[in-house]
Image (cartoon, grey):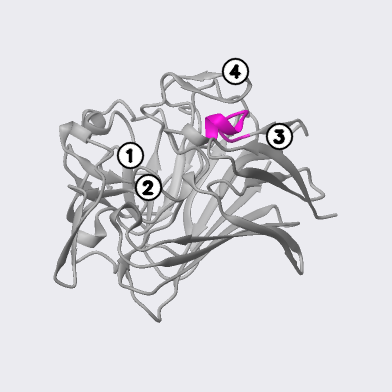
Amino acid sequence: MLSVTTSPFGTTSEGQAVTHYTLKNSHGLSATVTDFGALLTSVTTPDREGKLADITLGYDDLAGWEKNEPYFGATVGRYGNRIAGGKFDLDGKTYTLATNNDPAGVPCALHGGLKGFNKVCWSAETVEKDGAVGVQLRYLSKDGEEGYPGNVTTKVTYWLSEKNELHWEVEATSDAATPINIVQHTYWNLSGDGSQSILDHEVTIPAETYLAAGADMIPTGDASPVAGTALDFRESTTLGARISADSLSDACGYDHCYVIGGEGLRQAGLLTHPASGRSLEILTDQPGVQLYTGNFLKGADGKNGIVHENRTGVCLETQNFPDAPNKPTFPNSILRPGETYRHTMVMKFSW
């Protein structure tokens, strides 16, 4: 009952043909991926009454995905999240990146730069294995691209199973030392209506600590306890319960990296929408997960003619820590020749 279908999805502004790959299982769950940006452009699930709806934010046409300032559905690279000042030192040399974000007026590099992995065409092929079907995408990021050293070969595979799991798996190698932190950046609205607020969604994040950051949203290097703060989601809590706390004013809501203890594939978060019955569990093998509540979406175009207000989508982005190339105490973020970078994120749906 598993299937993969393909369909044309237009031509980029540079004249490259783009294809949609739609993965489906027998339970009504489907996921659509495109070879432009290795994007996850939609996920459709039933609600508790069997009504199907797309639970992701995005665009109706390729022109929207080419612009895509909020990074809807993006495979972000080479380095997801922020790098302070758009600079890092590696093996005695200073590298300078584009500074395309400036929280509190302080410039930084964000999500791979001006033309990251989410804005290039990948090669793609359909794949299958026992109990799952998928699409595998490949991209060569050349030495010097967006200021990063080394030729990096990246393979991203989306797998959909009959267990209602969507796996996003990454492998990357490089011929020179380079920072790497490839991140999946889908915005979720489990109501199935992207015009609605996500503040009624309930979240659980099994983290004792988060990365303290200044007004510039760059981590200080310290992990702070969540206990007694607006960042404590160890028990299921609505996103709206504490989002107006003074301590969240710098980020205008949640935009914080949580430290996920343990090793191997483990839970990073659980998102539920009581009204529809839908839920999404996120598992990862990475040390952190960024909770972002779409605090700056206002005015962003969306699917079906929607113009998004702030907080109409929520991200749970599994990843290494922000600014790790500049923080020796953070988990290693440098990929060297002969090594393979791996990142697995599992999205488990129920309704």
Give the image location of residue 287, x and y in percent: 37, 62
Q: Earlier in the sequence, mark 4 or mark 3?
A: 3
Q: Amino acid at mark 3?
A: Asp
Give me the C-alpha separation between circle 3 and circle 2.
26 Å
Q: Earlier in the sequence, mark 1 or mark 4?
A: 1
Give me the C-alpha separation between circle 1 and circle 2.
7 Å
Give the image location of residue 56, x and y in percent: 58, 35
Q: Answer yes or no: do the residues labelled 4 and 3 have beta carbons within 8 Å?
A: no
Question: Label 2 neighbourhood size at 10 Å, few (<14), some (14-19), many (20+)?
Answer: many
Q: Amino acid at mark 4?
A: Gly
Q: Amino acid at mark 2?
A: Gln
Q: Which residue is mark 3?
A: 47
Q: Is residue 224 visible?
A: yes
Q: Which residue is mark 1?
A: 255
Q: Answer yes or no: do the residues labelled 4 and 2 have beta carbons within 8 Å?
A: no
Q: Which residue is mark 2?
A: 290
Look at the numbered disc 1 and give the secondary structure of its residue. strand
